Structures are given as C-alpha cells and as structure tokens.
Image: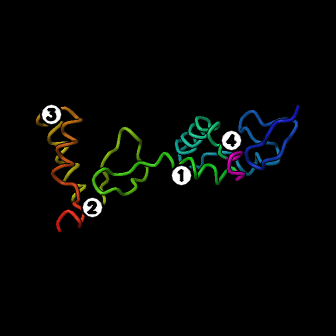
Amino acid sequence: MSEFCPDCGDFVASLNDITGFCENCTPSTAVVPSKKEGGTTAVNRSKWLNTNADKIEATMQNYNINASAAIKVIAAQSAVVCICCGEFIPHATAGRHFLCNKNPQCKRARRYYKYLHYEKGVEPEQALVTAINKFKKKDKTEHD
C-alpha cells in the first residue's frame, strides 16, 4: 500500500514517522531547532503543522499546489485583523488579540479597553465595544 507525501506529492511505500514526509523529503523539511530558536519556535511550528495537517492536505488536493503554498493559504485564512483599523496583526491569536499596536487610534483604543476592563471592572465585551466606538477610524464618506 502506498502513501501520499505531502511535500513532494508522490506516492511512496512509507512515510517517515517523525516528519510525516517521504525519506527523500525528510532531510530538507525536518524541523530542527537551532541554538538561536531554543527549540520553542520549531516545536510551535511542528505543533501547528500537526494540527493543520488535514487542512493542508485538503488544500493541496483541491488547488493542486505544493505543501508550502498550501501552508501559506491556511495561514492567511487564519490571519487576525484589527477591529479598529482593519489591518493585519502579525503573530496574533484569534480570539485573544483584537487591536493592533500600529496606529495611534488603535493604541488609544487598546489602552482605553485595558483601563475599562482592568481598572474599572467593565465586562470585556462591553469594554471592547466602548473602546472601538470611541477610537475607531471614521470612513471619509461619513464626514461628507
């Protein structure tokens, strides 16, 4: 019985148990933590790949693309956007990060949210709505 290698797209006799790729692809795609990374980045990357393996494989088959392109597609789908300015928030976790730290109004909204929630004891949802309503960037059409 042959198995599908998600890296090269070939059917092989068996996949490597550690990497999940065929033996030809394993040396080039194995996640080895460097001294600089301390292993944590590599471990997180490996966990993310294991968690999203089915999505990656389905994307590869549906769009006829390689593994690295499928990973980029999956990562873009799970990107987090600032609810104040609408810009992408790098390295953010969905459900945990709502506001970026790029623009002055976003910084003010973020600080105001923290003030309301942690210092005034307002519920998180209400504090977020209040902060966004106060600092959200207005569209140019709204001023006309």
Label 4 vs 2, first from the N-terminus: 4
Please give the residue where the numbered disc 2 appears in the rendered image. Answer: 103
Measure how far apart labels 4 and 3 are at the Cα level: 44 Å
Label 3 vs 1, first from the N-terminus: 1
Q: Nearer the viewer, mark 3 or mark 1?
A: 3
Please give the residue where the numbered disc 1 appears in the rendered image. Answer: 36
Could you say whether the residue bearing mark 4 is in a helix, strand or loop? helix
Q: Residue at 79% of width from left, 40% of height from top?
A: 4
Please give the residue where the numbered disc 4 appears in the rendered image. Answer: 57
Neighbour class for label 2 at 10 Å: few (<14), some, many (≥20)?
Answer: few
Q: Residue at 31% of width from left, 60% of height from top?
A: 102
Q: Position of residue 29 (x, y in %)?
A: 70, 49
Label 4 vs 3, first from the N-terminus: 4
What type is the residue that disc 1 sits on? Lys
Q: Residue at 62% of width from left, 39% of height from top?
A: 55
On the image, which quarter does residue 139 sit in? bottom left
Neighbour class for label 4 at 10 Å: few (<14), some, many (≥20)?
Answer: many
Give the quadrant of the C terminus. Answer: bottom left
Q: Residue at 22% of width from left, 42% of height from top?
A: 128
Of 78 and 140, nearer the camera is 140
Label 2 vs 1, first from the N-terminus: 1
Q: Position of residue 123 (x, y in %)?
A: 19, 32
Magenta residue span? 60-66
What type is the residue that disc 4 sits on? Glu
Please give the residue where the numbered disc 3 appears in the rendered image. Answer: 122
What type is the residue that disc 2 sits on? Asn
Q: Nearer the viewer, mark 4 or mark 2?
A: 4
Q: Position of residue 39 (x, y in %)?
A: 56, 42
Q: Which mark is residue 5?
A: none
Label 4 vs 1, first from the N-terminus: 1
On the image, which quarter does residue 52 sit in? top right
Could you say whether the residue bearing mark 3 is in a helix, strand or loop? loop
